[in-house]
Image (spheres, helix red, strand yellow):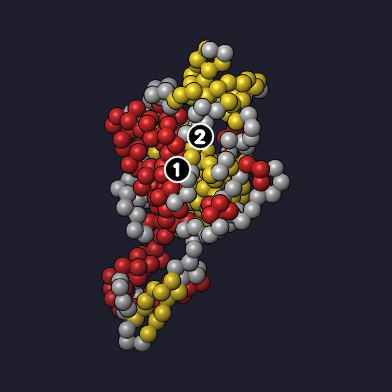
Amino acid sequence: MREKILKILKSSSGYISGETISSQLGVSRAAIWKHIKALREDGYEIESVTNKGYRLTKSPDRLTAAELSDGLSTSLIGQHAVFFEETDSTNIQAKRFSEQPDGTVFVTECQTGGKGRLGRSWFGPPGVGVWMSLLLKPSLAPEDVPQLTLIAGLAVCRAVRTVSHLPAMIKWPNDVILNGKKICGILTELSAEMEQVNFVVCGIGVNVNTEGFGGELSKKATSLLIESGTPQDRKAIAQSVLTEFEALYRLFLKEGFSPLLPEYKSFCATLGKDVTISRAGKEESARAVDIDSSGCLVIDQSGTRTSIQSGEVSVRGIYGYA
Ligand code: BTN
């Protein structure tokens, strides 16, 4: 109900009477008043003037379902959103509620047990990031799912460039970096039968307004605030990620990864670098020379070229994280 009232307030240019809202929603004026009070407690500034009604004058910097869907122009991704003030992990929630419709976004203000790739954890403090997971139900072969992860990285890269005008790049397969440090991580999890995907959860964490990182993390993590010196609009970033993801996802489902490859390569900071590949507890040196049409990284080791899939591999530059 609160979300519906918010939608009405946001779509009316001037004042709107309690009576109009109550008749539009089929609830009493007293109930409307109670919800307005709760919205104010959540940080919405709502004026009320006798004989005129209510007017929304300011929205708080909160990434709730209502804020995420306000003005979102997608047709699938994020059309349904589930919000948690605080949760362990939005990926866990998406898997828990996997019966929700295709394209549902699970979003939280604060993640207490965020999951990263390769069993790592993810720092998700309150009110400063975009911590969200997309529930997807594509008709795809399980082996093509890693490409979705690359698409999510490309979507974040585009969004940061468009909204914040910062030169985001991609560290293969899907970390988004700025000035050599990580601003975004993506964790894709899959539920599948032998030949068919049940659902995919694509978890995206963007460090937007994090003021600092402690200890070892400070060497490889950064945020849009730290790099730009100004707080950035979390809602605009999140909506742009969803919009870009939808466009890329639709094209990918129709035509595969090939049409997206040139743009992905143009943003891929890993190409041309000497890297260390860690797989199954072993480290090898190689030069990253190309990305193939299925999104694998092509490496050169003493003149021999091989392709590696994202899966259980970690790649880092020999001179630092990127
Ligand atoms: C990584 O770089 O290791 C991946 C990090 C993924 C973090 C995001 S935050 C939202 C979603 N929920 C999680 O628990 N993890 C992902």
Question: Residue sitting at 32 percent across and 41 percent down?
Answer: 247
How many residues crowd mark 2 within 10 Å: few (<14), some (14–19), many (20+)? many
What residue do we see at 32% from left, 84% from top?
A: 52
Amino acid of disc 2: Ala
Residue 81, compared with residue 280, is above or below; it is below
| 249 relative position to 238: left or right | left
Circle 2: element type: loop
Specify the label residue 157 is tagged with: 1
Q: Which residue is mark 2?
A: 269
Q: Nearer the viewer, residue 152 or 24?
A: 152
Q: Nearer the viewer, residue 62 or 230?
A: 230
270 or 33, which is in the foreground? 270
**Type of residue at label 1?**
Cys
Q: Quadrant of residue 148?
A: top left
Residue depicted at 37% across the width and 76% down the height? 55
| The residue carrying mark 1 has its beta carbon less than 8 Å from ligand 1 | no
Q: For numbered disc 1, what is the local secondary structure?
A: helix
Is residue 301 at all visible to an observer of this figure? yes
* Quadrant housing the N terminus: bottom left
Please identify the quarter of the rendering in which residue 152 is found: top left
**Does residue 186 appear in the picture of this structure?**
no
Height in image: 204 above or below 44? above
Label placed on residue 318: none
Q: Is residue 221 left or right of residue 3?
A: right
Q: Does mark 2 have its CB less than 8 Å from ligand 1?
A: no
